[in-house]
Amino acid sequence: MVLIALPILKLCLLGMRQLSRPISNFVRKEAKQSEIFRKYICIPPAQCFHWCEVTLKMLLLNLGRPVKVVPLNEAMALELGAELLGELIVFAVAAAGLIFETKRQAKKRDFEIKSVNVTSTDLIEATKVLEYRQQRQKMYIQEIAQALAELMITQTSTEVVYPEPILLEKEKSNAAGRIPHYSPSRCKSNELLYPGDHADDWICDCAPGALYYPDSDSCHPAFRRGPCEAEHMLILARNAVLPQCIKNDCKVDGLVKINNVCYQIGGSAPCPNAQLSYVLGVNTTTLMLDCIKLSISVKTRVGLLDDDEPDYDLSKVDLCARGSQRSIEGTCTPSVKTE
């Protein structure tokens, strides 16, 4: 950059010197033609410059200050004055050009700074707009996800529908095992392991009679306290999508009020046919209170033994009620009175 600037600077100085010559000739010509210009403008600066030059040279040479400096004759004074005026005019033009260029560069720099500031402001505003749009999109995604979850809950049946008579595609390798299994090592409490469409496709979901509560992200038995406050129980109202906590009039977990009487869930009262082990429980189809017949099915257990149903029919066997046992005479002890 410096190597390039120096030749340009020399060229400019040479141009200024060449420009001063015609100006000096013009001043000399005007001085010869005009006595006023020659006497008051051209010669006085020349005599002053001559006096200063002689005095300074004598002081530098240690010759002392001159007592009197001999002035130049008119011809020499006219020549020197014309050169001085020419140089002064060229210098004034160059100084004016330099000042103008400096101001122009300063204005250009200010304009660039303002442009950068405006660009930065625009970028900041654009970033704010993008952040606002991103927040709105996150809200939309959350709303869509919530609506999708509600739709999935609405479309999901509350009963266990396996096995069922449906047409299965050949590529679904896990289609044969569509019975849910009890696997406490893989699923949380009140959950069963449900098979999917392929061999390694398994998912934990709520067991029959249990309700999924989104706030706790877990399954809880219906008509029990579960995640609710004290003296409350979790139910799924008719035509509702999400379960809710309601007040338990019996104020004890496991007791429910039917016809103004509190009964124990899992107990035989108020169900008929207590000798056939009908107990008060939750209907897995309606998720409402009902008298449920106990089953000894082991199909939901995971083990090395055969999980098929027993060969006998529970409805054809004389059973004793819960809490009693059959004696050697074939009677149930203690005796149970049915309502």
Image (spheres, rainbow, N blue to C red):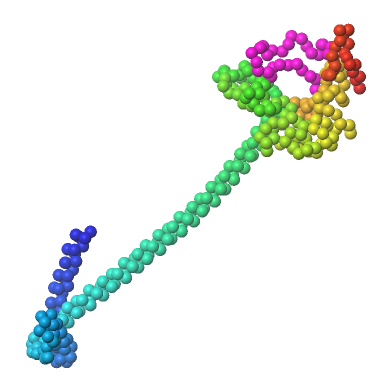
Image quarter of residue 38: bottom left
Image spot of residue 102 (x, y percent): 29, 69
Q: Which residue of the protein is positioned furthest toward the top in this rendering?
A: 329
Residue at 78% x, 38% y: name it. Answer: 230
Is 304 contained in the magenta span?
yes
* Residue 144, placed above or below residue 75: above
Residue nearest the viewer, comparing 122 with 215: 215
* Residue 218, placed above or below residue 316: below
Is 219 contained in the magenta span?
no
Image quarter of residue 178: top right
Looking at the figure, which quarter contains the N terminus? bottom left
- The segment highlighted magenta reads 290-319
* Residue 61, placed above or below residue 333: below
Residue at 85% x, 29% y: name it. Answer: 263
Looking at the figure, which quarter contains the C terminus? top right
Residue nearest the viewer, comparing 251 with 4: 251
**Residue 336 left/right relative to 233:** right
Image quarter of residue 212: top right
Residue at 63% x, 37% y: name it. Answer: 148
